[in-house]
Image (spheres, grey):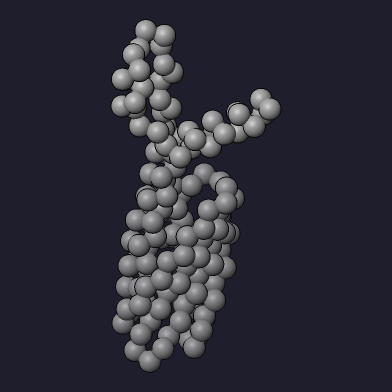
Amino acid sequence: MQFRFSFKHMETSQALQNYAKEKIKVEVDKFVSKPIEAHVTFSVDRHEHLVLCSLAGGDGFSVNVEHVCEDMYGSVDHMIDKMVSQLKKKKEKLKDHKHHKAPEPFSAGEEAEDFESLPIDASDIVKFETVVKQRR
């Protein structure tokens, strides 16, 4: 996992970099197995401390998370919580997508009434149209 850190309107802090690096690495390793690049930006604007984290994965996903708080370490913690929830959502979407079962093929003994009651997805229509075009 590669990290890049940027500091805007504040001094560079090795302790803050190490803190964010450890927290992000622990949480991201739970969800991702491919190489990841993380760009973390720390910024201060008056009394607000902003942490912005952009994750880019090897398999084409990206996550952008930010949090504003009055404490920089608190901002990092809240940003990690938001990042974990986004990663969980992405993982659940991938799980649901991969395990989506296609409808069972029709058997010869079924009646016409049963065919009308089955749901039709837009993907089924697209598949049907591509098969019809290929047969022409």
Residue 16 appears anywhere in the view? no
Q: Nearer the viewer, residue 19 or 105?
A: 105
Q: Image quadrant for the C terminus?
A: top right
In the displayed structure, would residue 55 be above or below residue 134? below
Image mark count? 0
x and y percentages locating residue 15 in the rendered image: 45, 73
Q: Nearer the viewer, residue 53 or 114?
A: 114
Residue at 40% x, 78% y: name it.
50
Residue 119 appears anywhere in the view? yes
Q: From the viewer's perspective, is 3 left or right of 101?
A: right
Q: Looking at this view, name the residue that lies furthest to the top.
A: 109
Q: Image quadrant for the N terminus?
A: bottom right
Q: From the viewer's perspective, is 84 left or right of 64?
A: left
Q: Nearer the viewer, residue 86 or 47?
A: 86
x and y percentages locating residue 83 in the rendered image: 39, 60
x and y percentages locating residue 14 in the rendered image: 50, 74
Which image quadrant is residue 85 in? bottom left
Residue at 42% x, 66% y: name it.
65
Residue at 41% x, 11% y: name it.
107
In the displayed structure, would residue 91 be above or below residue 100? below
Residue at 46% x, 77% y: name it.
42
In the displayed structure, would residue 100 be above or below residue 105? below
In the displayed structure, would residue 101 be above or below residue 109? below
Q: Nearer the viewer, residue 122 or 71?
A: 122
